[in-house]
Amino acid sequence: MSDLYAAAGGGGDPLGTCIAASVISPGTRSTIATYAWERLEVDPTPGPLGFRDFTRLATSAAGVFVGEATGVLPPAGSTLPALAAELPARLLLLDPWQGVNALADQIRQALARGFEHVRIVDIGGDILTHGREDTLCSPLVDALTMAACHLAGAPATVYVAGPGVDGEIPQEELLGRLPGPALTVSADDVDTVAGALAWHPSEASALFAAAVHGVRGTVRTVERRLDLTEESARIHHLPLADAMAHNPVAQALAETRPGTLAEAADLSEKITGIHEINREHRPEGIAAPPKPKALPADAAQALGVIREAAGGAGHCTFRFAARQCGLAWRQIPALRSLLQARGPLLALHDRD
């Protein structure tokens, strides 16, 4: 019997979840259940992708898996096929469009085929939202994961990797909701996903990885500034019931069991004021990615532009750096090479 990991937040959470799995289940090839819900610069279509949005998915008794040969039907986009080729894990696709009961059935199907425990991993910690934090931005997806696991009757534990690195709940506030002691993460655990970190636009998983590698201080991301501390490099865990007691959206989803994702998003909006699907239909409040242009010819000039935009922060993410240079996320590896950087963050100190 083995554990089923769940990347609670979609997007780049499979990266951080793979790091967590290396700590919790060392030496094993994990199975990670994940949504295909990514930022608009990766996927311009609103909401998550479902089974119908992919080609060449692999169907087994445990569920539907994304492989490196999996395709995405345009105009949609996804990093999951590339992650399937890079990560030392199998990626089980979760499709939430038919509501929380259908999602719970997907979890049950996996559990019936040999998984005995679900380890839900959230990078940053907004899974423990109380619903009204000023910086909260994406409460629905994590709440869906917890509600589905609860309804599936799954033995489950919730892990928060890198408290505060997603910028949605201030770290000091979040730590008051987390029990101790925390799990220790090593650089070797991070290095299991080094290849994917080199190109993936995830900021939260990259910040978690950077903190494990010892990066500290103020970081500029695309949306905000935040601080990396010793706690940013740790993993806390608590029982599913305790995590759900914090999260009013997860509680409401489990109680009312909305039959569609749209209904679940409406319910989340009533509680938090945030409608994640409508927001992507009308993305006025979301920072628009630039139209791609050629890579800067001069590294020193590019660094000057990035430093000025960072506004005194000691570090920035490569996603932020690419934005400032007018580059698309797919150009991150080329920008990294140009700047001769190392690791998931670009240091902005004068020594660079």
Image (cartoon, grey):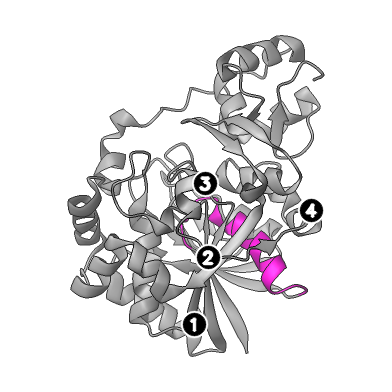
Q: Which residues are magenta?
A: 8-27
- Disc ID at residue 187: 4
Foreground tag (4 vs 2): 2
Amino acid at circle 1:
Ala
* SS category of the residue bearing label 1: helix
Q: Is residue 107 magenta?
A: no
Dot 1: few (<14), some (14–19), or many (≥20) neighbours within 10 Å? many
Q: Do labels 3 and 4 touch, CB within 8 Å?
A: no
The residue indicated by pointer 3 is 164
Q: Is any atom of residue 281 visible in this view?
A: yes
Q: Residues under labels 3 and 4: Cα distance?
A: 19 Å
280 on left or right of 236: left
Q: Label 4 neighbourhood size at 10 Å, few (<14), some (14-19), many (20+)?
A: some
Q: Main secondary structure of the magenta part?
A: helix
Q: Earlier in the sequence, mark 1 or mark 4?
A: 1
- Which residue is denoted by mark 1 in the rendering? 110
**Residue that numbered label 2 is attached to:** 179
Separation (CA) of disc 4 from disc 2: 24 Å
Identify which residue, 175 or 102, lies in the foreground.
175
Dot 3 or dot 1, earlier in sequence: 1
Seen in the image, is 87 located left or right of residue 261?
A: right
* Camera-nearest label, 2 or 1: 2
Can residue 61 be seen by looking at this rendering? no
